[in-house]
Amino acid sequence: MDGMPALRDVRCFAVVAEHRSFSRAARTLRLSQPAVSQAIGRLERAVGHRLFERSSRDVRLSAVGRTLLPRAEALLAEAAAFAEAAGRATAATRPTITLAYPTLLGTFAARLARRMAGRDTGVEVVLRAAGQRAAAEAVAAGEVGAAILAAPVPAGLAGVPLFTVAIDRLAVPAADPLGGHRTVRLGALTGRRVLVPGERPPGGPWPALVAALPTGTAWSVGPDPDDLAALDLVAAGNAVLPLPSLLADTVRRPDVRFVPLADPPPPLRFRLASRPDAPDPALLALVQAVHHLLRTR
């Protein structure tokens, strides 16, 4: 035999034998018919024998072709097993970083993970949805490599500025008169129960929002504003909920209305938080991908 036949030519041989047609084999392989014919010609020259008996109406294996077909199929199976094993070995050694994120920013987190995969960074991003406190605790404990947190970032963590998100909508029950307003001011919420998060660190928007509520307004701790369970309380008529339009625009509920706030509090400022230890290559790749995504969004 004149040299080792190429695996792609062996694959063409097996597919032509399966379909008994060069044209059907070409469609299966997504090649042109001349390309398949050339592959079979190269293989026949390599083995020194004709592999097919061709006629104007039919393509049949020759005697040598029938002998070699089981070997070709075994060779292709071994090549597929080799590729699978190599893929598993690569995945086992591929660096991974887990990113905790608020569900409010799920679209951004998914885009970031896709970008890391699409740019062949060699780093796999595993996403974990988590609230502010759980995400911060997971970073501090080393359970996740990084987290998207609302500022201020807890002490002991480093934070890279990302972007701001306005708290510019008020969720009200569909039957509430406020639902028909074009806008609503915080001063119009006298006598209402307003849901705010339990975590309201100084310097964030929630203390400013509570301070802006008029006298006689009851505010109470509810789920985080990106927890859609809070909307169940709104729909039941128990409360109203300030929240970002970024979240409101993703919700379709006939029992809740989202009214623009005319005087929203300062926006949420998000940071990419991590431990201040010497950063590993996976974290550096994540930070670079975040910066590039923010420049191109």
Image (cartoon, rainbow, N blue to C red):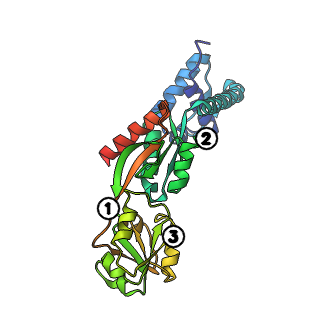
| Amino acid at circle 2 | His
Mark 1, Cα crowd under 10 Å, few <14 / some 14-19 / many 20+, is some
Amino acid beneath label 3: Gly
Q: CA distance from mark 1 to mark 2?
A: 67 Å
Residue for point 28% across, 71% down: 263
Judge by depth and name the residue closer to the eye, 32 or 87: 87
Give the residue at x 52% y 57%. Answer: 131
Does residue 246 appear in the picture of this structure? no
Q: Looking at the picture, which amino acid does disc 1 mark?
A: Pro
Q: Position of residue 69 (x, y in %)?
A: 68, 29
Q: Is residue 107 left or right of residue 92?
A: left
In the figure, 145 relative to 8: above or below?
Answer: below
Give the mark toward the camera: 1 or 2: 1
Q: CA distance from mark 3 to mark 2?
A: 64 Å
Per the image, the residue denoted by label 3 is 222
Q: Residues within 10 Å of mark 2 (few under 14, many from 20)?
A: some
* Element at label 1: loop
Q: Which residue is mark 2?
A: 19
Quarter of the view holding residue 177: bottom left
- Among the 4 quarters of the image, the one containing residue 64: top right
Q: How would you rate the neighbour count of disc 3 (Cα within 10 Å): few for under 14, some for 14-19, many for 20 or more?
A: some
Give the vertical position of 242 relative to 201 (above or below).
Answer: below
Tell me residue 92's x, y (percent).
62, 32
User: Which residue lies at the image location 51% right of the left edge and 32% below the top edge?
Assistant: 36
Q: Which residue has dot 1 on it?
A: 266
